[in-house]
Amino acid sequence: MASCSYTSAAMSVLCVRVRRRFSPVAGQPQRLALTRTRTARHMVVTCAAESSSSTRTSCKTIVPDEEFSLAKVSFGTIGIALGGSLLFYGFGAYFTILPGSEWSALMLTYGFPLAIIGMALKYAELKPVPCITFSDAQALREQCATPILKQVRSDVTRYRYGDEQHLDEALKRIFQYGLGGGIPRRNAPKLEMIREEVTEEGKYSLVLVFEAKALQLSDFEQRQPKFTSFFGPGINAEIRKGENDLYEVRLVSQTAT
């Protein structure tokens, strides 16, 4: 916040100097004075815009996700790598190409099932979605995010196995796949990323960004109450249209700071 105040103050001083430099001087021709006045106004507006932009940039930065968790590790990749290594060395040792022939049977015995399990997990693997977290939202998360919002964030930013897509159960209930008034399952929205940010009112919000090529904004807007009830209590859902086929569902926490 100190850097934000310093930037605003510096830009204010610069704008004052611009006004003084381009202020009309007594005895100048009227047209020249008018031109200089317009130039001063243009530069002052530019100063204000740059000051506002630099303030937002310096006060709202993206926090890198450096938190380590086993849930963020692909067990399929580990299984394939470990099993494949044991098989490779086991066969090499069995044919005396590599040392350790007395251990070849043991390595082959464990390497084969590990490789099979790894391939099965890799096939059923659902990768985590990207998460963009702003510094001001991170500061409010522990205090203002509801337990459900924390659980949603945790679930979609880790590897899952056997699920077709993230939030599959929630989307199934909200969009009522194959039921009257619902949508076909093939048109189901797909979660592309999430974003943690703070609203203009200073409230923590978790933004779900979906890609839905076969849906319209109205399909999301008419289900806004369902988003609120499913991810509640303690939140309000807001719907927004993003770029191209992207739609944003903002889950705003009502917990006061």
Image: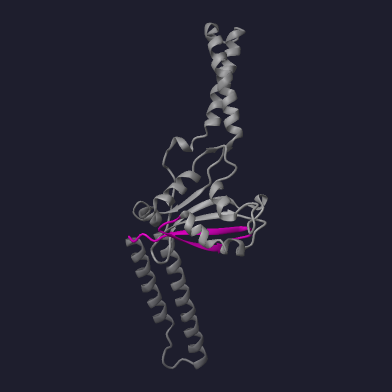
Name the residue: 58% across, 17% down.
87
Residue 99 quadrant: top right
Vertical comparison of 3 with 150: above or below = below
**For the magenta stretch, what is the residue range?**
232-257
At which x and y percent is residue 199? Answer: 43, 63
At which x and y percent is residue 141? Answer: 38, 53
At which x and y percent is residue 167? Answer: 54, 48
Residue 70 quadrant: top left
The reply, left or right, for residue 110 in relation to residue 148 is: right
The reply, left or right, for residue 141 in relation to residue 189 is: left
Q: Quadrant of the C terminus?
A: bottom left
Name the residue: 49% across, 49% down.
131
Vertical comparison of 158 with 192: above or below = above
Image color mode: one colour
For residue 237: magenta?
yes
User: As rendered, which of 131 and 30 lies closer to the eye?
Assistant: 131
Name the residue: 43% across, 68% down.
52
